[in-house]
Image: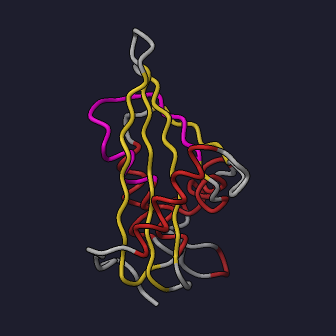
């Protein structure tokens, strides 16, 4: 089982507003060569949290076989959902957060759970805008996508 590093970031120009994600996948082969794939996409109207999730989702969906995946994100929303077991509680409570009502972005959380099936995953938080090279690159990919052409509709977004 290969080890993959997945770096992702999301951006929104306004919240909601135009947004985008940026993702970098890195894999080191047996000869020590690092292979890298970058992905990004922008949306007409979305939120920062949705783009943080999308960056991670598309990274997992690009994997073609089971891997050990180290996820690096500056999103506490994403990382804490797994590291603090929020996601398990949400699922067991029928996607409700107690008295606070339903969990937001259920469509993307479900898509992410499906995408990580079969992988060994570790979520790591990195401080945003703190000179972490891949996080800075993902941020640029995300903001460029949000500001770019060929924006898509975020079909699951609801105000």
Q: What is the total number of numbered labels drawn onto the structure image?
A: 0
Q: Which residue is rendered at x = 49% and y = 68% of the image?
A: 143
| Image: magenta residue range | 56-72
**Screen quadrant of the N terminus:** top left
Residue 124 sits above or below residue 57 on the image: above
Verify whether residue 150 appears in magenta.
Answer: no
Q: Nearer the viewer, residue 55 or 13?
A: 13
The image position of residue 89, as x and y in percent, is 60, 59
**Residue located farthest toward the bottom when viewing the structure as drawn:** 159
Verify whether residue 66 appears in magenta.
Answer: yes
Render colour scheme = secondary structure
Q: Is residue 126 left or right of residue 48?
A: right
Residue 38 sits above or below residue 97 on the image: above
Q: Nearer the viewer, residue 117 or 141?
A: 141
Q: Which residue is rendered at x = 61% and y = 43% of the image?
A: 133
**Residue located farthest toward the top when viewing the structure as drawn:** 31
Residue 150 sits above or below residue 115 on the image: below
Q: Nearer the viewer, residue 138 or 103?
A: 138
Residue 32 position by quadrant: top left
The image position of residue 17, as x and y in percent, is 48, 85
The image position of residue 141, as x and y in percent, is 45, 59
The image position of residue 68, as x and y in percent, is 47, 28
Residue 35 position by quadrant: top left
């Amino acid at each position: 089982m290969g080890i993959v590093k997945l770096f992702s970031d999301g951006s929104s120009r306004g919240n909601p507003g135009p947004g985008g994600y940026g993702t970098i996948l890195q894999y080191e082969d047996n000869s020590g060569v690092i292979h890298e794939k970058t992905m990004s996409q922008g949306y007409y109207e979305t939120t920062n949290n949705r783009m943080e999730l999308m960056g991670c989702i598309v990274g997992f969906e690009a994997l073609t076989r089971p891997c050990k995946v180290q996820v690096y994100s500056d999103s506490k929303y994403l990382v804490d959902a797994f590291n603090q077991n929020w996601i398990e509680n949400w699922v067991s409570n029928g996607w409700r957060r107690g008295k606070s009502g339903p969990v937001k972005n259920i469509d993307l959380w479900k898509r992410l759970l499906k995408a990580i099936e079969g992988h060994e995953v570790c979520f790591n938080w990195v401080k945003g805008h703190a000179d972490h090279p891949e996080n800075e690159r993902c941020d640029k990919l995300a903001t460029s996508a949000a500001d770019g052409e060929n924006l898509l509709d975020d079909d699951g977004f609801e105000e």
